[in-house]
Amino acid sequence: MTKKPLKRAVRQNLIGWSFLSIWVIGFLIFTMIPLFTSLYYSMSKVVLSGEGIQVTFVWFDNYKQIFSSSEGFNFLQSVSDFAIEILFKVPIITVFAIIIAVMLNQDMKGRGFFRAIYFLPVIIASGPVINQLVYQGAATIPLIEEMGILDFINNTFTEALARPIANIFSELIVILWFSGVQILLFIAALQKIDRATYEAAMIDGAGPWESFWKITIPALKSMVLVSVIFTIINLATFSENDAIQHIKTNMFALETGFGFSSAIAWLYFIALAIILGLSFLLFGAFAKERGRR
C-alpha cells in the first residue's frame, strides 16, 4: 500500500516547526526552568553548606524583608532612580539615533565605514570597559563640568530627582554609545522609503525640513516603538545597572543569599514589565495616530 505524499502546506509547516523546535527546546531548558527555580527561591530561604543547597519554603518573608530592611530600601531606591533615568535616557538615545541614521543614509563616500564606527561601541562596550572609561573621565563632556551644570542640578532639584539627572549628564557619552543598534534600525526603515516620494515633495515646493516631518518621521513611527522597547530592555539588563548590581551583591551575601536576591529580581522584573507596558501604550498610540494621518 503506497502512502499518500504530504501536502505542500503540511511539509512547509513541518519544516518550520523543525527549525522552531530548536528555539523551543532551548527556551524550555535554559529559560523556563531557571525562571521557575528563581520564583521558588524567591519564596524560600536558601542556604549554601557543605551538604549542598538547603531550601526552606518561607512564603513571602523575602518580599517582606525587601520593604523592611536597608538592603531592600537601597534596591527600591535604585529601581526608582532607574525609572526616572529612563524618562531622560530613552528620548536622548532615540533622537540621537534618528539624527545619525538620517545622516548616514545620505549618499556619501565611506558611508559603510561610519556606520561601523557608530556600531562599534555595541561590540566593545562591556561592563569592565565602561568602568575603565568612566574612571578615566571619558564618559562625560568636560564643558558640562566647566559650566557648572552638575552643581546647578544638585542645587535646584531635590535629591531624589537630582541624582538620576546628574548621572545622565555625567555619563552622557556612555548613554550615546547605547544607540548603535537603534541607528541600524532607523537606517533600515529609511532605506524602505521610496526616493520618488521626496522628489515629488520637492516638485510640490517642500523643503528638506518639511520633507523630514511629513515623510521621514511618519515612516519611522513603528520603528520608534521598537527602538524605545529595545532601549529600555538594553538599559535595564546592562551589567553595571545599579539594580542588577544589588541583585548580584545580595546573591552571595550571608545575610541575604539566593532567596532574597531572587525576590528583588522578581520585583525588578515586575517594575520593568510595568515600564514596558506604559511605554508600549504611549508610543503605540503615537504610532497609530501618525499612521492615521
Image (spheres, helix red, strand yellow):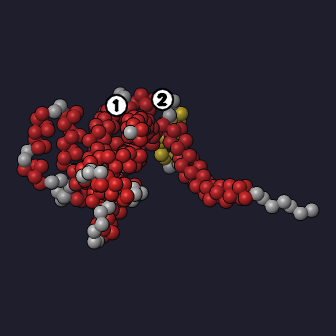
* Residue located at (60% from left, 52% from top): 24
| Mark 2: secondary structure | loop
- In the image, what residue type sits under mark 1? Ser
- In the image, what residue type sits under mark 2? Phe
Crowd around label 1: few <14 · some 14–19 · many ≥20 (10 Å):
few
Crowd around label 2: few <14 · some 14–19 · many ≥20 (10 Å):
few
Quarter of the rendering occupied by the N terminus: bottom right
Residue 75, given in percent of the width and then of the height, sits at 33, 37
Q: In the rendered image, is residue 185 in sight?
A: no
Which one is earlier in the sequence, the residue at label 2 or at label 1? 2
Residue 40, given in percent of the width and then of the height, sits at 53, 38
Residue, disc 2:
60
Residue 213, given in percent of the width and then of the height, sits at 29, 46
- Which corner quadrant of the image does residue 101 belong to? bottom left
- Which residue is at the far bottom? 109
Reply above or below: 274 against 26.
Answer: above
Q: In the rendered image, is residue 289 in sight?
A: yes
Q: Is residue 34 left or right of residue 81?
A: right
* Residue located at (33% from left, 34% from top): 76
36 or 192: nearer the viewer? 192
Residue, disc 1:
69
* Residue located at (48% from left, 29% from top): 60
Assess whether mark 1 and mark 2 are in contact (beta carbons under 8 angstroms). Answer: no
Quarter of the rendering occupied by the C terminus: top left
Q: Is residue 277 left or right of residue 174?
A: right
72 or 185: nearer the viewer? 185
* Distance (Cα) linking label 2 and label 1: 14 Å
